[in-house]
Image (spheres, rainbow, N blue to C red):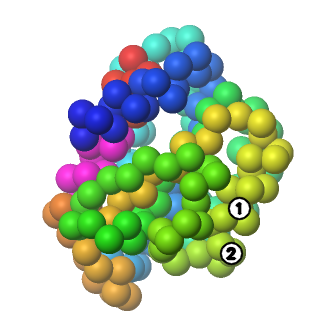
Amino acid sequence: MENLKKELETRLKGARRVAVLGVGSELRGDDIAGILVLEALKKCKKIRPSIKLKTFEGSTAPENLTGEIINFKPTHLIIVDSADIGEKPGSVLLLRAEEVGRGISFSTHKIPPKILIDYLASSLKCEIIIIGIQPKSIKFNSKASSAVITSSKSVASSIVEALS
């Protein structure tokens, strides 16, 4: 996670308004990763006063929040979701918007994440950071694994540290 923190510090340099969009379903085990990150972020209060941080719970239909996100006018947008990156459960991958759709499978959504990200990129003209967390299982009615719970808290902590 140290590399994640360093990369976030670099990518969030100059941030003034940061939107964090958590995506996922609490009904599908580790698909809740994006929502867990939001929950952990809401408990943190250590962000520089000059930075406005706003969280958006996209659940399984993050496209419903595009208007709110655009109205917030972020300088930076962080999207967090579970993603099959072919690694061990809880592994974290940081992507740029243009890298989405290149062999990485995101979790359950009504529209493909690539379409959502392309739309937001063209509407916002801001830095977009995508964080994928490898699930162990996204079976219906399963519980989140300890690896994903731990990684979600670490991702939130890395975001806060990068903005402190």
Are the two marked residues, 2 and 1, in contact with CB atoms closer than 8 angstroms?
yes
Q: Position of residue 151 (x, y in %)?
A: 25, 52
- Answer with left or right where residue 73 lies relative to residue 4: right
Quarter holding the C terminus is: top left
Identify the residue under disc 1. 116
Residue 131 visible in image: yes
Residue in the image at 43% along x and 47% along y: 94
- Answer with left or right where residue 151 lies relative to residue 80: left
Residue in the image at 37% along x and 88% along y: 140
First reached walking from the N terminus: tag 2 or tag 1: 2
Secondary structure category for the residue under label 1: helix
Q: Magenta residues, as a range?
A: 149-157
Q: Position of residue 19 (x, y in %)?
A: 60, 38
Residue in the image at 50% along x and 49% along y: 95
Disc 1 crowd rating (10 Å Cα; few below 14, some 14-19, many 20+) is few
Which mark, residue 2? none
Identify the residue under disc 2. 111
Q: Amino acid at mark 1?
A: Leu
Choose between 142 and 110: the one closer to the eye: 110
Disc 2 crowd rating (10 Å Cα; few below 14, some 14-19, many 20+) is few
Secondary structure category for the residue under label 2: loop
| Residue 65 quadrant | bottom right
> What is the distance, in whole Å, between disc 2 and disc 1 at their CAs?
7 Å
Q: Position of residue 59 (x, y in %)?
A: 54, 66
Residue 43 visible in image: no
Quarter holding the N terminus is: top left
Q: Main secondary structure of the magenta part?
A: helix
- Residue 46 magenta-highlighted: no
- Answer with left or right where residue 86 lies relative to residue 88: right
- Give above or below for 116 relative to 152: below
Residue in the image at 25% along x and 60% along y: 90
